[in-house]
Image (spheres, rainbow, N blue to C red):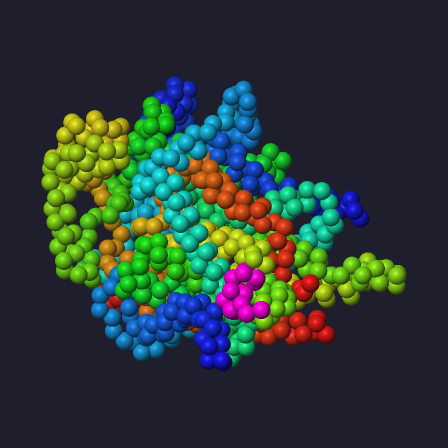
Amino acid sequence: MSGRRDWLKYGFVAPALLLLIAMNVFPLLYSIFLSFTDADLVGGETQGVGSSNYGLVFRAPQYAAALRTTALFAALAVAIELVLGFALALCLKARFRFKSALLTLLLVPMMLPPAVMGIYWKLVLNGSYGVLNQGLAALGLGQPQWITDPKLKFFSILMLDVWMWTPFMMLIGLAALNAIPPYLYEAAAIDRASPWRVFRRLTLPMCAPLLGLAVLLRATDALKQFDLVMAITGPNDAATQTLSALLYQVMFRDGKVGLGTAYSYVVLVLVIALASVFLRYLERLRQRGAA
Amino acid sequence: MKILRWFLVAVYFGVASLPLAWLGITSLKDKNTSISIQPKLLPSPSGSEEGIWYAPTLAAYRQLNQTYAGAAQPFFHYLWNSVLIGLLSTLGAVALGTACAYGFSRFQIGGARDWLFFILSTRFLPPLAVVMPVLMMYREFDLQNTHLGLVLLYTTFNLSLAVWLMKGFIDEIPRAYEEAALVDGYTRLQVFWRITVPRAAPGMAVTGVFCLISAWNEYGFAMTLNNQQAVTVPVFFAGLQGNVQGLPWPQIAAGVLLFVAPMVVFTVLVRRHLLRGVSFGTIKR
Amino acid sequence: MYRKDWFEDAANQASFKAKYGRDLKPPDTWAEFRDLAEFFHHPEQKRYGCSLLTGREYDSIVMGFQPFLWSWGGSWGDPATFAIKGHLNTPQAAAALQFLKDLLAFTPPGGSNADYSVTLDAFSNGSTAMVLDYFPFYPGVVASMGNQVGFFVMPGKDGQRAISLGGQGFSISTKVPAAQQELAKQFIAWFQQPRVQEKWITYPGAFTANTALLKSEAFAAASPYNATFAASLDHLQDFWNVPVYNELLAKAVLHLGEALDGVKTPQAALDQLAEEHELIMQQAGLLK
């Protein structure tokens, strides 16, 4: 009967896998081909150019800059969101009235479209008629130019990302904290362990696998950062040009499809490499946790 | 200690909800009030315009029904596109994802770990890095600027999340019920449909909410593939930049509030299962 | 456009005459523009002299800088040889960029990076005296501000007056199938018929290049800004319209932006920009 069994089990997983292959693998293979041409967005004749596109990628200072900007953004965003979110989760661990109402409210920033919120924040952060600076002026404080000062633009976008995604980290932190069996805490109490000891030896290690997974998810999302940059500074701003913004500029503004796909490939290879390293680390964490 | 905790929560809550409150306040203004140099903070019941008070109006919400200058359609047309594309792609992702997760959970499939890594890795791809070949492919099959095109794409990219979330849920469902039913003569499909799915329903709801939020707010693909027809709300609002009548701030605020309302409603409906949902199966009960 | 009511206020007219020795009226030269901006700039009262196009998304800053570049005698390059050095980075061009930078002292906060909607909002919220923007943006302002707003042609310098061409001319891509190109040609032929243009100009913010219509009474009466628009047409110039214009634009935005932000001097910015523009032109096969 194993023949029928095989048909059945593949029947469950095949549709999803086929769709993923059709929508991911074929395009990726096609884009390898494109990256060796001088294809243009508008169409017309394309010619092979050998590997000159890749040469351009590695020589372009804009690419290195975008890598740095993206890595810095992801690292800072995830670090702040993790610390802030987990701290919030610790504060909200206890059961209290209106807890689920409060939680749902706290999750709302996560549900807003970043592409539109970015535009809206241009009103809030406007140096002249934006409410934030109007408030600061009323308090007698300075008037930072949040979205026009080249030194501040990056941090404004970072601030916005933190505002939107800290609730996500809080949610996962809560899930992790809730899963710790209460008897462990009771045992620690009997041993008269200090709150700091409890946190370091009990809470943190038990939450680590799930928090690690959350960091992975959030980091891969942060590395893709595009919507906020597009909305607030556009894709061509040196201070905030992330990899996705650079890709958009090269492919859709400059129209250089061949070069753009070469860029994309290098990005993809980087991301996959990072992800597999991190996943392996997570597997080890999980095994250690289970032991 | 307890007071410190509540103080921190209160401060965070205040700061985090200020932008949302400001969205509400802005949505009740008219255009000139929203860009006023003099801060206009509070809607006044008496309609006075002195100092920080302003006269609230629902005009912004009403105007969403009209076509803004230079736009092709009123807001609600784009909202409908978002609803259609969002719901269909969520259904697709949850259905295919649940089936796929069930397969990996209950059966021995060769190379399962590699497949699962492949599935997860699709989530790592920046949309902008993948969009060009997809665009070329869509041009070939005439899928650019269609609902179907985005539905397919969103289903695909939500699959990774769906499979991982549902695998966590399904792994938790004891096999005993299914084994018993199989012994009783039910087919595997019937077991899946009648026993597993009802038990996995809370997980499917949570997965559905996350997939829907992801598709609802998506911008990168929508902007590059569907910028003329089947345009979704984020692309519509972002496209208002550079509009000759300027940005209609109160309408944008009103539109965003209306746009996020369904997400809030759905999240409220599944709130009880949210914490379980985000454990991604790493937490065993 | 400018705040007509502020310009017509008797107290303003008196104090302007006392301070600058001439009548308070819309500027004809850049020097006059600067004086007017300085006169109306009272940041402590939240009143600002001017708002200029300096945004970094797409092309605002390039459109904003061009009139200065041309008025000072510079240009983007030689249209025949595509040579750029010696045209874009002359001392006059650097002086033009410096003049623009100095004008930022009279703009609202954030004026070094103001795109179309920010510039428009700065005027619409009643805080700014003069704004340099494109005509299609004006119908909404006229509708909400009525008699408070007046219009003037872009100032010039030493008799040179040049204005950024707005909108796009009709262009047909040679990379699309011939059938589509034919359809495009048919559309253009239909659109430029006088009877179609006569209907077209009745829509708010719709303009024409039909010279007969431009001189007509109907056009001038259709809106408060049409007469100024007609007067502007003789001075229009454009950025490069070569296939690689987008890359040229992107580089210009970056370097001009850095000059306005104070990261480098105007001369250094233009030198580097000329260098990069020539590189792009070479790669495109235009510059030998």
* Residue B185 spot, x, y in % from top left: 55, 70
- Identified at 64% across, 43% down, the residue is A101
- Identified at 51% across, 64% down, the residue is B190
For residue B234, side relative to residue A279 (left or right): left
For residue C19, side relative to residue B202 (left or right): left
- Which quadrant is the C terminus of chain B positioned in? bottom right
Residue A228 seen by the camera:
no
Closest to the observer, A46 or A20: A20
- Identified at 54% across, 77% down, the residue is B108
Asked if residue C197 is positioned above or below residue C11 in the image, the reply reads below
* Residue C193 spot, x, y in % from top left: 11, 40
- Identified at 71% across, 50% down, the residue is A92
* Residue A14 spot, x, y in % from top left: 44, 71
- Across the whole image, how many numbered discs are drawn on residues? 0
For residue C119, side relative to residue B17 (left or right): left
- Locate residue C164: give its quadrant: top left
Q: What's the magenta bit mostly, secondary-structure-wise?
A: helix
Which residue ends up furthest to the front in the rendered image? B184
Residue A199 seen by the camera:
yes
The span shown in magenta is B184-197
Closest to the observer, B46 or C227: B46
- Locate residue B45: give its quadrant: top right
Asked if residue B63 is positioned above or below residue C286 in the image, the reply reads above
* Residue B75 spot, x, y in % from top left: 38, 40
Closest to the observer, C248 or C38: C248
Residue C259 included in the magenta stretch of the image: no
Residue B188 included in the magenta stretch of the image: yes
